[in-house]
Amino acid sequence: MAEETFSDLGRVEAIAKLYEGTPYRPFESSWFETSGKAYVTQQSRTFIEGIDFDLIYFPLKHLGYKCVTAVTGELYAELSHPRTLDIRLGISSKLDFKHIKEVWEGIVTAAKEHGYSKVSLDLVPSPNGLAVSVAANGETSLLTAKRRPAAKSMDLICVSDNLGAAFMGFQVLEREKRAFEKSGDAKAQPKLEDYRHLVGAYLKPKINPQTVSQMEETEIIPSYGYLVTRGIADAVKRLVRDSGLGAKIYVDKLPFAGKTFELGKEMNIDPISAALNGGEDYRLLFTIPIGKHEKFRHDFQTYDVIGHLAKPEVGAAVVTPDGVELPIKAQGWKNE
């Protein structure tokens, strides 16, 4: 049976076919009605080939999954429950229906995982490579919003998982890409086995879908929340700006994935710099009242306490293992 192409199907039929076998309906409005006890939140982002991802090594299904995860994480940082998604795919001439079907499969997998009730899709031509635009709509309980405490000095700064792994995984992929291009061998295979976990952290980051529900059930409501996308330093700088307080992050409290330091030595990359100023980790950062410390550690065992809020004059500081305080300089991550 011949593969279906966009020229055979056309835009409308292609969209309808993509929805086959999914729990979602095509051409359905993403509008939803709130209960009156909640308000709507929105997050959006556009991912562009050559800037945000490289199709030489990025599996299309993982790409779709990651794009949804990125905006969903921003909803969770606001303590918002995911409700609907609006997806727009800009398709270049080098891609056909089978390729977009892979992207769509990743999108649907993530949408189901995070409990979205509706997913709308549009397909448009793109002259400059693949583009994935994702807009997520969520719902935040008014009661939860009212329960958010005021941030105070000594409140705990917590992150949901290890840091710097995605940046290190990205470096492995770039190294193998250079080796492939230099070899000139179209059958050459990348050497990823030793660092598969780090590569996976970049290609397919995971966020716990129960994050907001668990916080509401345990009544541990953070004062601030952020999705860590450009390194922990950037997130802490935003926290200091928004809260009007200072913050201290302790180097010896930063969590790292296995083999991070081994790879850092191999590639001459400082894992601590990767954690502070790397990117694409998609970890959640929350500030928790210090009085909730014991309960938080019991109920949220995957989180690490990496520091605390401080007096405003402290600014954003990182504390070395020997107690030296250094100002945090958030550089962000350039995908070069």
Image: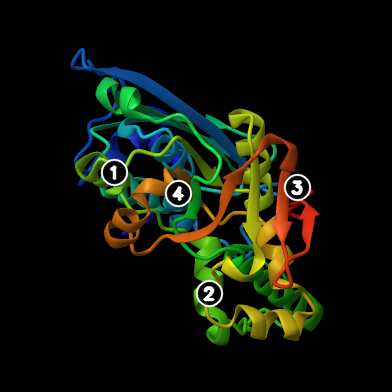
The quarter in which the C terminus is drawn is: bottom right
Which is more N-terminal, label 1 or label 2?
A: 1
Mark 1: give few (<14), some (14-19) or many (20+) Cα within 10 Å.
some
Tell me the CA gap for discs 2 and 4.
24 Å
Specify the color scheme: rainbow
> What amino acid type is highlighted by mark number 2?
Ala
Whether residues under marks 2 and 1 lie with C-beta atoms below 8 angstroms apart, the answer is no
The residue wearing badge 4 is: 64
The residue wearing badge 3 is: 330
Whether residues under marks 4 and 3 lie with C-beta atoms below 8 angstroms apart, the answer is no
Left or right, residue 69 beside residue 250: left
**Mark number displayed over residue 257:** 2
Tell me the CA gap for discs 4 and 3.
28 Å
Mark 3: give few (<14), some (14-19) or many (20+) Cα within 10 Å.
some
> What amino acid type is highlighted by mark number 4?
Gly
Mark 4: give few (<14), some (14-19) or many (20+) Cα within 10 Å.
many
> Secondary structure beneath disc 1?
helix
Depth check, front residue: 107 or 263: 263
Mark 2: give few (<14), some (14-19) or many (20+) Cα within 10 Å.
some
Q: Nearer the viewer, mark 1 or mark 4?
A: 1
**Mark number displayed over residue 249:** none
